[in-house]
Image (tube, helix red, strand yellow):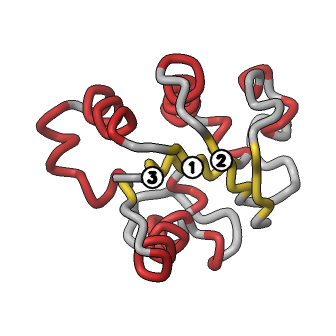
Amino acid sequence: AQIFFSYCPRNSEIAAKYGAAAGFVGSSWADPRKVKDGLENKKNLSCWIDYENAAFLAQAGLFHGVDEAMRRSEVVIISMSNEYMASETCRNEMHHALFCLHKPVLLLLVGTSDSVERDSRWDKSPHAKGLEGVGYVDMR
């Protein structure tokens, strides 16, 4: 795939609808799953996203599967939000892309601009180090 999508399921209306997330925070049109579909259908880009690769992840293991898919991708799109930064799994994916694989990263700012988790905006988190200068599109 050309693009690897890293996102928090709480920012996906579709994930919440199917019970893969405990509630939905954000806007419907910025749902990472919808953005991925748009890039594939309208721009003819190949994208990798976890829910479409559940069998592969079950076989390879979550970390190894994500690592392999990320290595094969040209760019990583991170749907960044307070919920994303509050998730250890999401932060691990971000760290792996930026500091281990040195992948080009684009942030899609999703969720809300208000503090939702841990009384901290994502960009004020100590985990946001390394995101300075990373390009972004604000979809909130």
Q: Residue tagged by mark 2?
A: 106
* Sequence-wise first label, 2 or 1: 1
Could you tell me how far apart the alpha carbons at marks 3 and 2 are, in whole angstroms?
A: 10 Å
**Image point 59% across, 26% down: which residue?**
98
**66 lies left or right of 123:** left
Q: Quadrant of residue 108?
A: bottom right
Q: Which residue is located at x 39 percent, y 59 percent?
A: 47
Q: Position of residue 101 (x, y in %)?
A: 47, 23
Say if mark 2 contacts mark 1, CB within 8 Å.
yes
Q: Secondary structure at mark 2?
A: strand
Residue 77's tag is: 1
Q: Give the total of numbered labels.
A: 3
Residues at badges 3 and 2 in contact (C-beta under 8 Å)?
Answer: no
Cβ atoms at labels 1 and 3 below 8 Å apart = yes
Labelled disc at residue 3: 3
Residue 92: x percent and y percent? 52, 26
Callout 1 environment at 10 Å: few (<14), some (14 to 19), or many (20+)? Answer: many
> In the rendered view, would you say 66 is above or below 129?
below
Cα separation, mark 2 vs mark 1, equals 5 Å
Query: Where does residue 52 sit, x and y in percent of width and height?
Result: 28, 60
Instruction: Tell me which label, 3 or 2, sits earlier in the chain.
Output: 3
Kindly state the secondary structure of the residue where label 1 is placed: strand
